Image (cartoon, coloured by chain):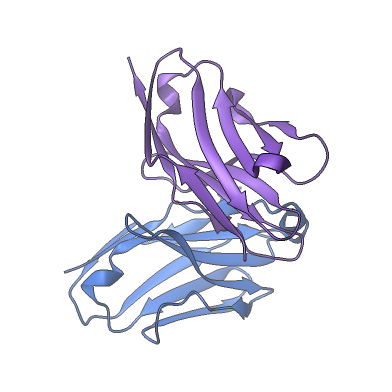
Amino acid sequence: AQSVTQLGSHVSVSEGALVLLRCNYSSSVPPYLFWYVQYPNQGLQLLLKYTTGATLVKGINGFEAEFKKSETSFHLTKPSAHMSDAAEYFCAVTSNRDDKIIFGKGTRLHILP
Amino acid sequence: DAGVIQSPRHEVTEMGQEVTLRCKPISGHDYLFWYRQTMMRGLELLIYFNNNVPIDDSGMPEDRFSAKMPNASFSTLKIQPSEPRDSAVYFCASSPRLAVLTYEQYFGPGTRLTVT
């Protein structure tokens, strides 16, 4: 069975500061990993994904994430936070054996002026 | 493209009433997913379809919930009878076959259901 753990249901950072949202996964097969973002009153949008190949993946809005197999992690980072980054972020996992995706509980990112 | 369309956006109903949520996937998408989101349980997959056929309904909480996809452009999620604990945001998402291989799902805006 696959699972995802997001550390911290709420994270606050100052505008211009580094954003780091943590995600650890559990999977018995090679994982495919995702970060989705949900803005208020909207559905989820794909930020970035890792399937195979380069372990550092870049997504939209300046976000990136690094797949670290030895640490079973897929943390999301952005060098400089903007007010518009305030949203809820979901880490997710699946594999090439599944049609469905397992989502984490989400981390709400607050940006302080 | 208009994206995934869900209706209604908000629904308030009394306990015991029947509720029907509707979804129109993106044209050409072969997969359709229904999710439920609550503060306590996060985002849960309820059921998904491939080419209008239900593939996995193991996430449907109980017999009060049912879902159908009569054609490629329409799906419904029905709750009968509704209970206060069904209050949540319900999302529909769709994927084209190729995107399933890379696992990108396109989400609708959701229906916020409140059962009093």
Give the residue displayed 80% in from the left and 34% down from the top: A54
Side (left or right) of B79 relative to B12: right
Of A32 and B114, the residue lying toward us: A32
Looking at the picture, does residue A17 appear above or below residue B52? above
Q: Using the rendered view, name the quadrant where residue B72 is placed.
A: bottom right
Indicate the chain coloured purple by its letter.
A
Give the residue displayed 51% in from the left and 15% down from the top: A80
Tell which residue pokes out farthest to the right in this image: A53
Q: Position of residue B13 (x, y in %)?
A: 21, 70
Indicate the chain coloured blue by its letter.
B
Q: Position of residue A59 (x, y in %)?
A: 65, 31
Q: How many marks?
A: 0
Side (left or right) of A33 relative to A78: right
Q: Position of residue A62 (x, y in %)?
A: 60, 23
Side (left or right) of A108 relative to A65: left
Give the residue displayed 61% in from the left and 59% down from the top: A101
Looking at the picture, does residue A59 appear above or below residue A27? above
Q: Position of residue A79 (x, y in %)?
A: 56, 17
Tell which residue pokes out farthest to the bottom in this image: B63
Q: Using the rendered view, name the quadrant where residue A39 is placed.
A: top left
